[in-house]
Image (spheres, rainbow, N blue to C red):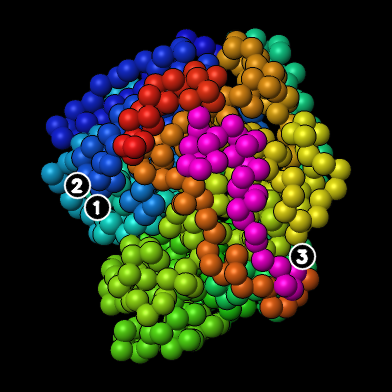
Amino acid sequence: MRGGYAGKVLRLDLDGPSYRVERPREEDLERFIGGEGLCIKYLYDEVPPHADPLGPENRLIFMTGPLTGTLAPTSGRHCVATKSPLTGCQTTAHAGGYWGAELKFAGYDGIIVEGQSKSPVYVFIDDGDVHFYDASGLWGKDTLRTDTLIKKELNDDKLSITYIGPAGENLVKYATVMNDQQRSASRGGPGAVMGSKKLKAIAVRGTQDIRAASPGRYFKSMNELLDTCYGHVVTGSLFPSYGVTGIIGLMNEKGALPTRNHQTGNFEGADRISGQAMASAMLKKTRGCFCCTIHCTRVIDIPYGPYHGTRGKGPDYDSTVAFGSQCGNDSLEAAAHANLLCDMYGLDTVSAGATIAWAMELYERGIIGDDETRGVRLKWGDHEAMTSMVHKIATRSEFGAVLADGIEEAAKRVGRGSERYAQGVKNLDLPGIEARGSKGMALGYATDNRGGDNLRPFAAAAECLGFRSKELGMPESFDALGEADKARWVVQCQNYSVAVNSLVVCMFTIIAFTVEPGQYARHLSALTGMEYDKDRLLEAGERIWNLQRAFNAREGFSRRDDRLPYRLTSEPVPDGPTKGSVVHLEKMLDEYYEARGWDKDTGWPTREKLAALGLEYAANDLEKSLPAT
């Protein structure tokens, strides 16, 4: 087996329950790397078209990459993938902490979960050995209590455990898979899929080694990565000092901070919810994941006010925006409390906050009222109403039951034009960048294979913050509000993003183009013995992106789904530095499909493109999906 890999994948069949061990194919490792890449290969091959995301045919996949668990900076991450119950697309969610590294030390590159258990179960992987345990006593417990009880039952407080909370058990369609108490694989509802399989948790412990194919080259490239990360202003200074919320003020100044359900791009209370405010008001210490050089996690303790005693992981950028500016709330304490509630229940903070913000706008406009909300006054800035709604969503109680299936389903139930105010792409709620203030981000939102996403690519780092990659063909300067000639570099950044998510390391190492593709290619080569240069690494990313798109196309998605919400394309920003801006998407899409080598009418990869990437079988499937003429 290649260096960097454990060489085994564990398959859990919950119908039994039973398990078996498989070896990944060498060809798949070379072409898809690991992490997000291997996830889409397994999903595409094993999930039949139009399978029920909450049914037994769906897969829930946990996958590490070759860099996971090594000495590479930020190598403590893993990927969770499935067919999303929220969007119907393939979805990949990524989490930090220690669980991914521990899985590698236990001898496995990944876990594929299939079938459905008749009763709640959890799994313990002990240095390669696999044990099933009854989880009936854990069902209904929050994530922190689950962590404590499993460690007590297995008599090991050093275990790393991934689990769902009540939101996943209740099949809330944006439920998360949590691990290590407060790390989260969030987007697209993998927690609901885990809940549908009655799988409460997977605990791991391991002691096995990971070897490098060329140790001398490996340590040389590792030192290069360390020097790069420590020497960059973002990964070496800004994020360690203030976390990712340290850029809230900068994004607000650029008119790219979504506010009150994306009505505008600047928030009058931005300074009060920033990372700098967190550092002065409630920060106790910082924390990093396995082998992390950045330590962006804020550990907080609120010493005063109605949320006194709130302790734990502070909200990151997207969570702060979701429960801060998006809800018109300038109470950082309330945003922090809502964030911790989501972690305990196992809820995606972005979707939860965005859904509440949507409901607040409906309430403010008189579309819904007290009868529907059961007296919860969902007014802008009412943080008590906001935090109470988190509980109601997770438990599917009262108006929370309407919001628990996502905005698209909620709008169908509410009606009265409420869908006009939904801010999502492919039913995935938009995160913390206002796209009318960053047109590259707008294009990224529209075309992302899992729905509205701000990390593939984080175009605002280039357009709003001024960072550049030397290797991705980016121009010397940007007009953030311009729409021409964005497609080519957006495509390259997307390819790079999914390649990095397949290694697997933290996206924060490339969010401001800190580590270039050539650096990761050299490191991957030294570790695995498979020779990569930057072009081959980016080609792997392109292959992964195209197979994700083919999966979605097979499910019926097309160009008509690469759209933005009505507000972003039809309502000019009313004030601030981006006043008057809207997104004119169609021409940008044409340029994007041309840069991708895709069909402009369908938004699907062409046979020629798929064949060039060695994905002829996907081309055959798409031809079968074409409507009869």
For marks 2 and 3, the one nearer the N-term is 2
**Which marked residue is nearer to the observer: mark 2 or mark 1?**
2
In the displayed structure, would residue 467 be above or below residue 140? above
Left-right relation of 275 to 29: right
In the image, 70 versus 449, the foreground residue is: 449
Q: Are marks 2 and 1 in contact (CB under 8 Å)?
A: yes
**Where is residue 275 shown, x and y percent of the image?**
69, 63
Q: Amino acid at mark 3?
A: Lys
Task: Name the mark on residue 556.
Answer: none
Q: Residue at x 78, y 71 (%)?
A: 577
Q: Residues within 10 Å of mark 1 (few under 14, many from 20)?
A: many
Task: Name the mark on residue 120.
Answer: 2
Left-right relation of 427 to 516: left
**Where is residue 619 shown, x and y percent of the image?**
42, 26
**Where is residue 627 shown, x and y percent of the image?**
33, 39
In the image, 381 versus 143, the foreground residue is: 381
Residue annotated with mark 1: 138
- Range shown magenta: 578-606
